[in-house]
Amino acid sequence: MKWFLAIPHYVVLSLLWIAFGVLTVVAFFAILFTGRYPRALFDFNLGVLRWTWRVAYYTYGALGTDRYPPFTLGAAPDYPATLEIDYPERLSRGLVLVKWWLLAIPHYLIVGLFTSGSIISWNNSLPDGGGVLYTLDWGGLIGLLVLIAALSLLFTGRYPHGVYDLVLGMNRWAFRVAAYATLMTDAYPPFRLEQGGHELPRLEPPPASAHTPARHGATSIVALATGAVLAFAGLATAATGTGAALLGQARDADGFISTGPQRVATSTYALTSEQITIAGQGVSFLRDGVGRVRISASGTRTPLFLGIARQDDVTAYLSNVTHERVTPEGIGGAYDRYPGAATPAPPSSQTFWAATGTSTLTWDVQPGKWTVVVMNANGTPAVAADLRVAATLPWLGGLTAGLFIATAVLLLAGTALILVGIRLATVPTSAPAHATPTR
């Protein structure tokens, strides 16, 4: 039941980790330009790591206690699992550029084996000869050992001592790498699986700190977390707005934005799309959102016919004609086949088409049930073409402007709240005694 009981912690930590990521980026630039990790940010991020470790120790990161974790960023020294990271007075401005991605790579490989154990494989079973890259995450060595511990606890009520020591050693390794990778220390993590319920004593005392830890009250925590979430949302809207702006730059001279070419081919008389149903609010939505639609064909020497008509008319026209229907899953390969014995009349002789073209078809969205048809103009079998679908997307300019406005508002509000949260963090008048070794 611990996974269920810990759900409130997971909800809070999901927000705190967004704040952790944003504040780590802020700390990156602070270290790069000043050589110092802002104390208020350091203590907040340390609190997130502490909170995460306590929840992991209670749940399936260790299953090491039945005592429910406290909702606090503080040290909670009376809890069975504790975490301390010495505050660095100075940090290397050069190392901050490389330690979190380049220097930590060997540790990432080891910690990945401990915590996730993902297996990457390639499946080349697609009909067109392509493949799919997929991963299988089996929980890593920690997950496997905790599963063994869970079975032992379930049937005997006891935690195997050797398993416990291994689980604690792997978690220590992972959190040391986390501290290094998130810029909280320049000390390279040791390649040492330090087992046992208690960490080995230090060979030398930690350096004395001239600063006392900042205490984050509820207001400070809320301001920092909210500001970081807003800043993160601002980065997301900035990325989306940039993508929308680049998409807008792809308009052609007629104002259309097109997809890339998609090859379609069949040995039958026609290729049709699935039924396109436009009704109710969908009509105004597509007219306002998609605008005009254009379908173009290329890559063939045989004159083509492109047409769009109501589904019932197309069904009647091809009722006894061999043709295939393109499905979303079948694009680029397999289609649904409909057999028949008749030879179709030339498509241009039919009067039910709502829009037609040889190399390009342009259509204004109308309510109804529609089907797109691609045939040879003379009605012969063996149809092949490179199709492109385009639309005017009249809303794109407004969306781009709105996203950049939202970006500015979110980043300004987020930055202001982060600064308020830092200022609200209080510093005790006397430095506390150094914490006991990590357990």
Image: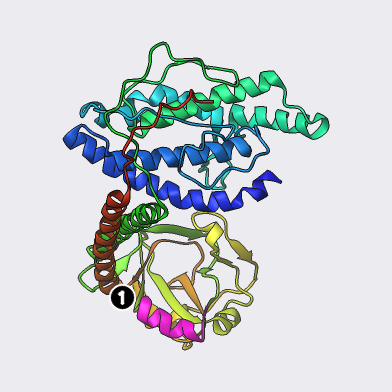
Q: Quadrant of residue 268?
A: bottom right
Tell me where residue 244 appears, x and y as whole percent.
Answer: 29, 63
Neighbor class of circle 1 (other Cα within 10 Å; few <14, some 14-19, many 20+) is few
Q: Is residue 268 left or right of residue 399?
A: right
Q: Is residue 286 magenta?
A: yes
Residue drawn at the location 50% of the way across and 62% of the way down: 382
Residue drawn at the location 28% of the way across and 66% of the way down: 406
The residue carrying mark 1 is: 395
Q: Quadrant of the C terminus?
A: top right
User: In front here: 137 or 175?
Assistant: 175
Residue drawn at the location 46% of the way across and 38% of the way down: 49
Tell me where residue 270 appears, x and y as whole percent.
Answer: 52, 69
Q: Residue furthest left?
A: 33
Q: Is residue 154 left or right of residue 164?
A: right
The magenta region covers 277-289
From what the image shows, is residue 45 above or below residue 248? above
Q: Quadrant of residue 337?
A: bottom right
User: In front here: 298 or 236?
Assistant: 236
The three-letter amino acid code for the residue at tag 1 is Trp
Secondary structure, mark 1, is loop
Q: Is residue 30 magenta?
A: no
Residue drawn at the location 66% of the way across and 49% of the way down: 5
From what the image shows, is residue 57 above or below residue 404? above
Tell me where residue 259 appears, x and y as whole percent.
Answer: 35, 62
User: In front here: 376 or 416?
Assistant: 416
Q: Is residue 164 left or right of residue 123?
A: right
